[in-house]
Amino acid sequence: MGEIHYLEIFKQSFTLVILLGCSVVSVTLALERLMFFRKAWADGDKLLAHVANLLQSGKGEAALHETKKNPAAVSQVVHYGLLHRGRPRHELEELLASKRLEERLKLEKFLVVLGTMGNTVPFVGLFGTVVGIIKAFRDLALAGTGGPAVVAKGIAEALVATAGGLAVAIPAVIVYNLFMRRVKSLSVDMEVVSARFLVMTGAK
């Protein structure tokens, strides 16, 4: 059985081209979300303590400015609360809840793509394998003789598609699960900060 030339396999298999495109998309989105989540986190207790000190010092505008420029999810929730802190408690609670939903949508952006990659890419690889095996047996039929040796190389090359699909899907699933856990953690942080903000401002 001759040596397998992977570059030639790539040129001849459109499924491997699709898998390469999926891999590029997955890596790009994973890096984008990684950088976003690094900016989206902040210590809620320290933030609230700083805001409380500014408010007690009569620097409400400074508190608004600092929370607005901070990209962290909890900071954006506090900023929204500061904008509406003069409202009754039940209204402020609803406004903070709506802001948390808005921030969660930002956190979940592109994650559905990563999840879809993890679920569907293995089937793309399997499709490539099935097509490759069909071609291998077609070659055997055309050759008429030669036995398994005729199809062995073709089948080995076809299985590269399955391996490629798994190589793309497994990291995508791992990254998706890690990011979803991060989304849940940040969502809890926003709820905790919202509750403490209501107490801190004495909303009634």
Image (cartoon, rainbow, N blue to C red):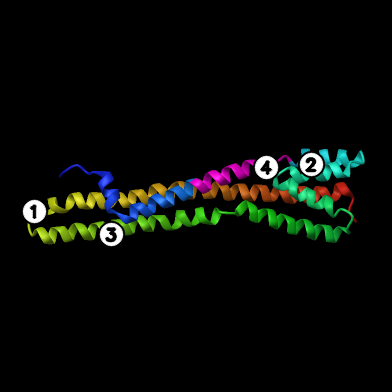
Q: Residues within 10 Å of mark 1 (few under 14, many from 20)?
A: few
Q: Is residue 44 magenta?
A: no
3D distance between C-alphas at marks 2 and 4:
15 Å
Q: Earlier in the sequence, mark 3 or mark 4?
A: 4
Q: Which residue is depicted at the point 34% across and 55% down? A: 15
3D distance between C-alphas at marks 1 and 3:
21 Å
For disc 4, the marked residue is 41
For disc 2, the marked residue is 66
Q: Residues within 10 Å of mark 3 (few under 14, many from 20)?
A: some
Q: Quick check: can you spot residue 175?
A: no
Q: Which residue is depicted at the point 70% across and 48% down? A: 73
Q: Position of residue 69 (x, y in %)?
A: 74, 43
Task: Please tell me whether mark 1 sits on a helix, a strand or a loop.
Answer: loop
Q: Position of residue 127 (x, y in %)?
A: 32, 59
For disc 3, the marked residue is 130
For disc 1, the marked residue is 146
